[in-house]
Amino acid sequence: MSVSVMRFVSSGVGIVLGGLFVYVGVQKHLAPYEFAEAIQAYQLLPSSLVGLVAATLSWIEIVSGISLILGCLLRHRRFSNSFPPDGILRRSGLLLILGQALLFVVVLLITMARGLKIDCGCGLFFQRQVGLESVLEDVLLLGVAGWLYWREVKIGGREEESLTPVQSKL
Amino acid sequence: MTRVTWRRDLTWTIGLLGLAVILGLMFHWPLVQASLRGNLTALLDQKRQERREVQFQGVKTLDLAQAYQIWQEQKALFVDAREAKEYQELHVQGAVNVPPETWEGLAASELMKMDRMRELVVYCSQESCDDALKLAKKLRAAGFSRVMAFTGGFRAWDEAGYPADTSR
């Protein structure tokens, strides 16, 4: 596949992934007390920290999603030396998403190992219990975010170099 | 990736994280404050009650003592609104299972062949779950006028040591 097609594909995947995080973040932001109940049901945090996590996690999802979407949209701008530096929004958004997805997988596995039958509070479009399905969903997100980040770090620079002469001809 | 770029990425990530934390604190400070002061459970109970009063207006609710009394008097049919595997594991003695995945086709279920004046007590897993109220609302809409939701759920029933059955 050509470099420009792959760039287009990864931008599309990034926008979808970012959009999913914004969507779930907004859902949690609009129902903070239900989300706090879901966190409490995991019995992993002291009660004093549940409110803080419920209040901030939704915004971490929203901010990381917006950062990734903006980074993907700004990828095709004309001036690469403007602010913010090219790729930084994508990479930092992806790092946050990777961190969250990893955290969700660990928490779900711990909860499964403890045998708790609770709503995961993590379903993308519908409620579901903690189980293999919810773990697989987060592993998929982790994989997609990991692939995008790997492209950014390993291939991104080379793609930019290979595209530069073509752009300069235009 | 150079060390400078890596450091710059981390700085931006921490910056975004900080921004998210500030926004979260700004929008949901009452929740954070209640949690830090040890009042979280009371606040969540109050908010849940307020939400349910609006969302499930008209659905009568029962506490554990009322539900047990009705069960002892054998006046009502208990309806378990949990997943089939949870029901099979353990349920209120004599209860029938109407799991959430069957609610779409509720009109064709066995329950609908019953007398609409039959008293029904619907329950789900625990106090925080809404499935009992959701199913009770659906059953009311289907014509059952004497439907009640036992909000303590099976957890409260089981913890009280009241009679339970297994289908395994």
Image (cartoon, helix red, strand yellow):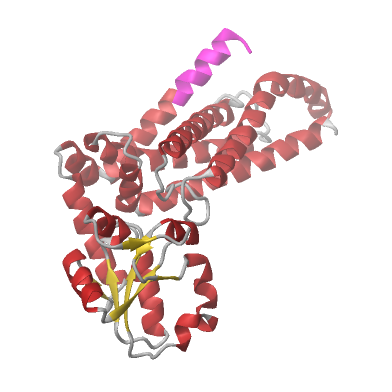
- The number of numbered badges drawn on the structure is 0
Question: Which x, y percent locates residue A126?
Answer: 50, 57
x, y (%) of residue A3? 81, 30
Q: Using the rendered view, name the quadrant where residue A159 is placed.
A: top right
**Residue A76, percent from left and from top:** 68, 36
Q: Nearer the viewer, residue A12 or B91?
A: B91
Residue closest to the eye, A99 or A79: A99
> From which residue to which does the magenta span run?
B1-13
What residue do we see at 46% from left, 62% from top? Answer: B167
Report whether residue A69 is seen: no
As drawn, B141 above or below B31: below
Q: Is residue A109 above or below residue B79?
A: above
Q: Depth check: give the residue in front, A148 or B152.
A: B152
* Residue B145 is a magenta residue: no
Height in image: A26 above or below B92?
above
Depicted A31 relative to depicted B94: above or below = above
Q: Residue at x 80, y 37 (%)?
A: A5
Q: Is residue A11 left or right of residue A46?
A: right
Residue drawn 21% across the image and 69% down it: B68
Residue B60 appears in the figure:
yes
Residue A85 position in % (x across, y down): 57, 24
Q: From the viewer's perspective, is B72 left or right of A148?
A: left
Indicate left or right for B18 with A87 as reference: left
- State the quadrant of the N terminus of chain B: top right
- The residue nearer to you, when weighing B90 against A25, is B90
Q: Name the chief secondary structure element in magenta.
A: helix
